[in-house]
Image (tube, rainbow, N blue to C red):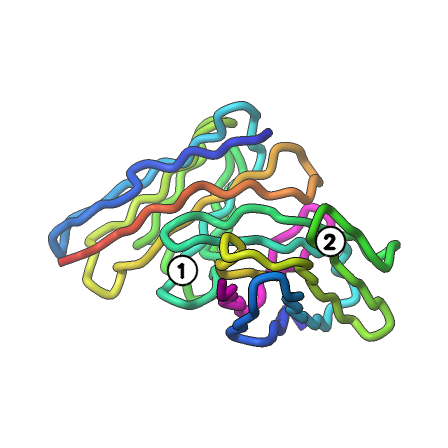
Amino acid sequence: GAVVSQHPSRVICKSGTSVKIECRSLDFQATTMFWYRQFPKQSLMLMATSNEGSKATYEQGVEKDKFLINHASLTLSTLTVTSAHPEDSSFYICSARDAIGANVLTFGAGSRLTVL
Amino acid sequence: QQQVKQSPQSLIVQKGGISIINCAYENTAFDYFPWYQQFPGKGPALLIAIRPDVSEKKEGRFTISFNKSAKQFSLHIMDSQPGDSATYFCAASRQGGKLIFGQGTELSVKP
């Protein structure tokens, strides 16, 4: 079945630095990828939708200059948290859809970001 | 209109019992209703999904019941096992659209 790989699984950084998280579809081409954020014991909140070769669409309230998303190929999307602060500490999860209009989303294992 | 409301927030069931989690939605344009299972520190995994043209779908011990007129759907886990202890999320989307998640239910199955 479809597999989405996310890296790194855990990252600790100092306040003010930038962190990049990669999301790869391993055995399919992902026309659309989604980035979610999840706080402890809460639901997944959609941050943005990225389509290969075009700009990401951000959800209301998500700072696009802080959370940079790049979807340069059909198998790779990256999320860069710029000038990270402790309040950005969270569990970031990507997901991918393998065909235009398909409903099934495959999720990565998530990346735990801790900003000191 | 984009919300999906899920209940209960937490559920404790004895081994062998039936776990039931309920969800309700408002947007009648939704046409895809999946359930995801998430273990601590992991991403969600698709468990089972249904479309509104059927009222029930069963896969092993997991069954989705769907009531289109009431705009509600539920997950039933038969013969619940300790290994089923996880957080369950219902979700809904339109064809090819964004997946909107419910608030989650933390299930604990006691041996």
Considering depth in this image, is B74 or A101 the residue closer to the camera? B74
Q: Is residue B76 above or below residue A67?
A: below
User: Element under label 1?
Assistant: strand
Residue A38 badge: 1
Residue A8 x, y percent position in the rendering: 29, 38
Are circles 1 and 2 on residues that touch, CB within 8 Å? no
* Quadrant where the N terminus of chain A is found in the figure: top right
In this rendering, position of residue B47 left or right of residue A61: right
Residue A108 badge: none
Chain bearing mark 2: B
Tell me which corner region of the image, top left, top right, bottom left or bottom right, holds residue A103. top right
Q: Is residue A108 above or below residue A29?
A: below
Q: Do pointers 1 and 2 mark residues of a single chain?
A: no
Measured in 3D between alpha carbons, the distance from the residue under mark 1 to the one under mark 2, in whole angstroms, is 22 Å
* Quadrant where the C terminus of chain A is found in the figure: bottom left
Q: Range of the magenta residues? A: B90-111
Residue located 52% across and 64% down the image: B109
Considering depth in this image, is B32 or B76 the residue closer to the camera? B76
Which residue is under mark 2?
B32
